[in-house]
Image: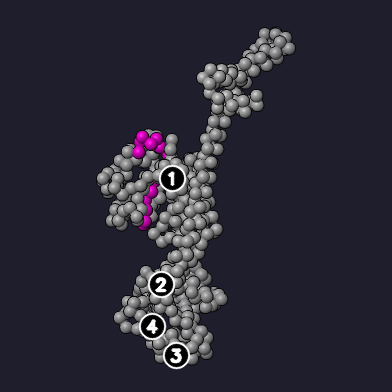
Amino acid sequence: MAILAYGINYRTAPVALRERIAFPEEALDGYLHGLRAHVPSLSEAAILSTCNRTELYCTLDPREENRLLTWITGNRDVSIDELASSAYRHWDVDAARHLIRVASGLDSQVLGEPQIMGQVKNAYDIARSAGTVGPALHLLSQVSLNTAKRVRTDTGVGRNPISVAYAAVLLSKQIFETLSDKRALLLGAGDTIGLVAEHLSKQGIGAMTIANRTLSNAQQLAAVHHATAIQLTDVSARLAEFDIVISSTGSSLPVIGKGAVEAAIRQRKRKPMFMVDIAVPRDIEPEVGELPDVFLYSIDDLSEIVEENAKAREEAAVEANALVDEGARYYLRELRVHEGQAVLRRFRDKASETQRRELAKARAMLADGVEPEEVLAQLARSLTNKLIHEPTIAIRNASADDQAETLELLKNLYEL
């Protein structure tokens, strides 16, 4: 049996194809059992399906790979030709190397993104619950996740923010020592502001308010993040309440002017205000940046930070790849150890069976009245002959066939 990693990702397939091949998480249990029933030699399987990839990890006879493909095309809206032109396959140690890269975020569309490690773990947890993870995939998942953790802790792959939303939040932490006693105002209710709200929540923001032209949209996003919602028209009157203002609306004109910020700073008694304008066109008048006690950053400022951090991650990825190779070698070594343990078990079982048979013969001789000394001598002779029979034949054959390496191995094994 061999381990196969087979799939498509954002590099090899457009989103229209990826969404047709994606497997819904709530139905994975049934799909895993169906896959195992369809491919006779397949004993273990796990399915990793995210917005950027769908991959199957399984143990099977390489000659039955086509049965795996017919199962995929039979269960997803894809033809054999479409699948073949977009899919990749990795066997054994290459499968391990690939999964380590995936779990580490090194194979992600956003280099070093952290969510994928949890998605990999979840995929294998589902497969374990379904009973389709055995010793081979258990070893593969454990080595891959452990190595991925090392990549994230020992290198800078995931340390520097490379999304505008995350950069905005981390920049606020450079202005304020802690966010736990700070109040944030987010302008807008789109995807970017949703990500900002998520990051602020994770950083322990004290309080958060979301302002939007359509109040219901602000209320919907606020409910997710335990925030409050206000109308965009109320912002000027309440601006002084907030330490952090991050804006990303679709307005064609500024929604916060210099005068409103000047008034807010006076009310705040010159306590600093951190402002980030992610919108294009801009939501905050550029002149606001000239005011004392105001730290204003634009989308261009954040883009420069993101670009620098992306370069830093790429440099860290070189170091991370060395850990990936180390993890793949460790996987191969552990796999050989596991295979050796299986051989050792069979060797011990065979010796135990020989012992059981010879002991039964000795007991029968004692029951027939044979002298104990004679029984012991016979037992010793018989056990010795049985245990050295096969090594004796191996030594004779190796000598006859001039197999010097085999002879040397046997000499070392038996200390001859």
What kind of element bears circle 1? helix
Rendered location of residue 48, percent (x, y): 40, 50
Cα separation, mark 1 vs mark 2, equals: 35 Å
Residue 221 visible here: no
| Residue at mark 4 | 284
What are the residue bounds of the magenta stretch? Answer: 51-65
Q: Residue 212 or 150: which is nearer the viewer? A: 150
Q: Residues within 10 Å of mark 4 (few under 14, many from 20)?
A: many
Q: What SS does tag 2 mark? A: helix
The residue sitting at 35% across, 80% down in the picture is: 282
- Res. 303 mark: 2
The three-letter amino acid code for the residue at tag 3 is Glu
* Distance Cα–Cα, label 1 vs label 3: 59 Å
- Rendered residue at 36%/34% (across/down): 63
The residue type indicated by label 4 comes to: Ile
| Outermost residue to the top | 369
Residue 247 painted magenta:
no
**Mark 2 or mark 4: which is in front?**
2
Residue shown at 39% from the left, 41% from the top: 33
Name the amino acid, label 1: Ala
Instruction: Judge left or right: residue 42 versus residue 158.
Output: left
Mark 1 or mark 3: name the one nearer the start of the chain.
1
Q: Secondary structure at mark 3?
A: helix
Dot 3, crowdedness within 10 Å: few (<14), some or many (≥20)?
Answer: some
Front residue (pair 214, 333): 333
> How many other residues sit within 10 Å of disc 1, few (<14), some (14-19) or many (≥20)?
many
**Where residue 139 appears, x then y in whole percent?**
51, 43
Q: CA distance from mark 2 to mark 4?
A: 17 Å
